[in-house]
Image (tube, grey):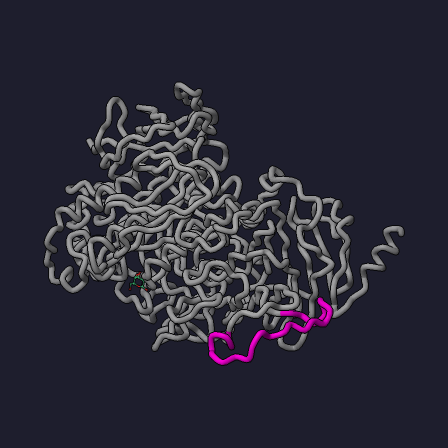
Amino acid sequence: MNQITRLAAYFLFLNLGIFVPRSLFSEGIGEIIKSAGNNASVEIIANGIWRVRLGKPEEFTPTHFRSGSIQTQSLEALAPAAASPINLEKIRFAVSARGCVVTLPMNSGEHIYGLGLSTRSFDKTNTRQKLIPSDNPEMEGGVSHAPVPFYVSTDGYGVFVDTARYATFYIGDTSPLIDAPETNVPEAQIANSTDVLYKARTLANRSILVDIPAAQGIDIYILAGPQMLDAVRRYNLFSGGGAVPPLYGLGMVYRGKGDFTAQESLRLARSLRETGIPCDLWGLEPGWQTATYPCSFVWDTNRFPDPSGFVKQMANMGFRLSFWEHCFTHSISPIYDDIKPFSGNFRVWNGLVPDFATTNGRKIFLNQQEKSLFSLGVLGGVKLDECDNQPWSPTPWSFPEASRFPSGLDGEQMHSLLGVLYQQTMLEPFTRRNLRTWGLVRNSHALASPLPYVVYSDSYDHHCYVRGMANQGFSGLLWGPEVRDTGSVEDLARRVQTTIFSPQAIINAWYMKLPPWLQMNMEKSNAGELMPGHEEATALIKKLFELRMSLIPYLYSAFNDYRLTGTPPMRALVMDWPNDPMTYAVDDEFMVGPSMLVAPMFAGQGKRSVYLPAGTWYDFWSNERMQGGRKIEVSKPLERIPIYVKEDSIIPLAYPVQHITKTTVFDLTVKVYGLKPAPFVLFEDDGESNDYLSGKQSRVSLLWSGTSGQIERRGDYTGPARYTVSQWENIQESPSPLRPLGQTTGSTTLYKEPR
Ligand code: GAL
């Protein structure tokens, strides 16, 4: 059959189905290799990424507003993918007045993950997920602060559906008549209980159905593996690569009480320095503004009589500032009249909703941000609150889905994209100054990996927060499980242990006068009452913060890897072990960087079970060597979180500093696990600017010969060295005795006490 007749044969449409032969996929990137009028065309976008265009897609989609460009070269470095990982012949498409539907094949054994930063569900197999932006503790099934229409499979591929609609994904729980012969699945019994009535049934066949409202067409992107992690990497590189924080962004964050004055902020910030509690970013919550629900974006000079003096004093103590705001604009704001024509046609809390998809909307909004914030000097970041949708709250901070915006977006599309558009807008002043930032945001969406913002939530359930740690990596998102008030010191310590392994380690004391280690109870904190045992609690929390500070070089390297290869710095176990069904439900452990497995503990839990995947592992604290492929029972004292290190890896641990400066040099103890560890590559640059993008960076490799360590520096970073190694510690067979942090054994030191 020649090419023409072959194509003609594939133009058979069934229910507007498309039929594309694998053999055609050896064509060049960018070439449209099949088109079927309005109905279907397939284009290879980059190595291992196919775009299937079905019908006539909408204009306003995540790719229309993409934050970064496709990292074609990095994608080339991944395994070549000649054929689509899923059988494109089995994709079906239908359009109706209510929108369009895509049906994709699903194998019997595969498990599906992703679809955004859900904190309540993990394995999405056999579930329905309606991607609604919000976070309501009662809701699950696709509702989250950051819904993302991208899923990955243990079969080693991913699918991105390019839509800002509230699409519903039916994952293996529908059984299309068309796909399978009639089967009669006999029911074993007449149901005599609700348990029996509602139990799972075996379906004759299954598929993944995506129901997209309003759209008369859709682009879907198929991303090849061969493994699940490769598909995730491709997605992140397609998005523009992963964001790299400024070095200080990896330090500790403390957010002060919402109505703190300049004096109160300075006093508490000073006391952190005096007690040696590490902190890099100081967060100002609503009280810096004259009005906040909605916002004026103007300093309240009653609380902050001299904003610029305040910023300088904080900077002198080594604090970067992170400013809270949301975008709903108060009528007393100087930009109100100007931004009105570039706002949606409904108010939120009586404020305007700026349309960040218009150039003028962005410009007018940023002019005010320049005046109030950026002109004051170096800022660390912004916290972009309330950009999620909360239709269930008594005064919803949401505009109707039927809203219209001057850019042409409707309310549903804007709800999905508001967080991303707002992040892009507020990134611009940093980029213009050649500075990096590390912000917070409460809503995000697809293709967000290049955006330097961490998603947070008020929801606060610790188990959910840990699940977020495992889920974030599936969807190109970063998650910050913040710590506030707690019911016990144990809860405080366990929560802090989770946050110090996250992309942004946050104490969010926005409703507490005292830090939680001085008083964990909100009322007592606001009455200024110190809790009994606060000295011990302070020492404990300080140790945990120091652990975070010692991990900064390791984390910085993991983020550089995120940028270059798309590998999520924090990810679920199933991503690294997709062929091990024991990992499929593990949502309370996660990998950090290349070789650390972290299994947080929860208050009230004397011990927990930890699944160690196949291989050899070392207990980070005791150095005990253990075989994986099994569950172990673990118990750790309050100053420790269960951490396991893969054999044959190198972990650099820095002497913990209180905060990062331009000239910080990390003094490293390099821990070498096993006899033949892979080199560890540190990322070295100025830590703050975007110069690394034009080559001003070095790779500092830590190599172990079997008996001694060596450092190799390659690259064009000309500033002072960021890293020195003061000792190498080789850990092999013999377990060393359990030592508390800071104690020394023989000639080696696991951690040094702060000098
Ligand atoms: C909430 C936010 C909190 C805090 C508070 C201030 O919406 O999630 O972290 O910033 O607003 O009013």
Instruction: Say if the magenta span includes residue 151.
Output: no
- Point out residue 135 in the picture as x, y percentages from the top left corner: 40, 66
Q: Is 197 situated above or below 104?
A: below
Q: How many marks?
A: 0
- Point out residue 46 in the picture as x, y percentages from the top left corner: 65, 46
Q: Which of the pair 568/157 is nearer the observer?
A: 157
Quarter of the displayed picture in which ligand 1 can be seen:
bottom left
- Which residue is depicted at the point 39% across and 60% down? 442
Asked where in the image residue 719 lies, by quadrant, the reply is top left
Q: Which of the pair 12/613 is nearer the observer?
A: 613
- Which residue is depicted at the point 19% across and 57% down? 520
- Point out residue 433 in the picture as x, y percentages from the top left corner: 41, 44
Q: Is 746 situated above or below 266?
A: above
- Which residue is depicted at the point 35% across and 38% down? 619
- Which residue is depicted at the point 47% across and 46% down? 568
Asked where in the image residue 596 lies, by quadrant, the reply is top left
Tell me which segment is drawn in magenta: 175-198
Q: Which of the pair 492/244 is nearer the observer?
A: 492
- Point out residue 137 in the picture as x, y percentages from the top left corner: 37, 68
Q: Which of the pair 725/662 is nearer the observer?
A: 725
Instruction: Say if the magenta span includes residue 190.
Output: yes
Q: Is residue 19 left or right of residue 723?
A: right
Q: Is 417 situated above or below 705?
A: below
**Quadrant position of the C terminus in the picture:** top left
Residue 415 appearing in the image = no
Residue 18 appearing in the image = yes
> Which residue is at the far front?
189
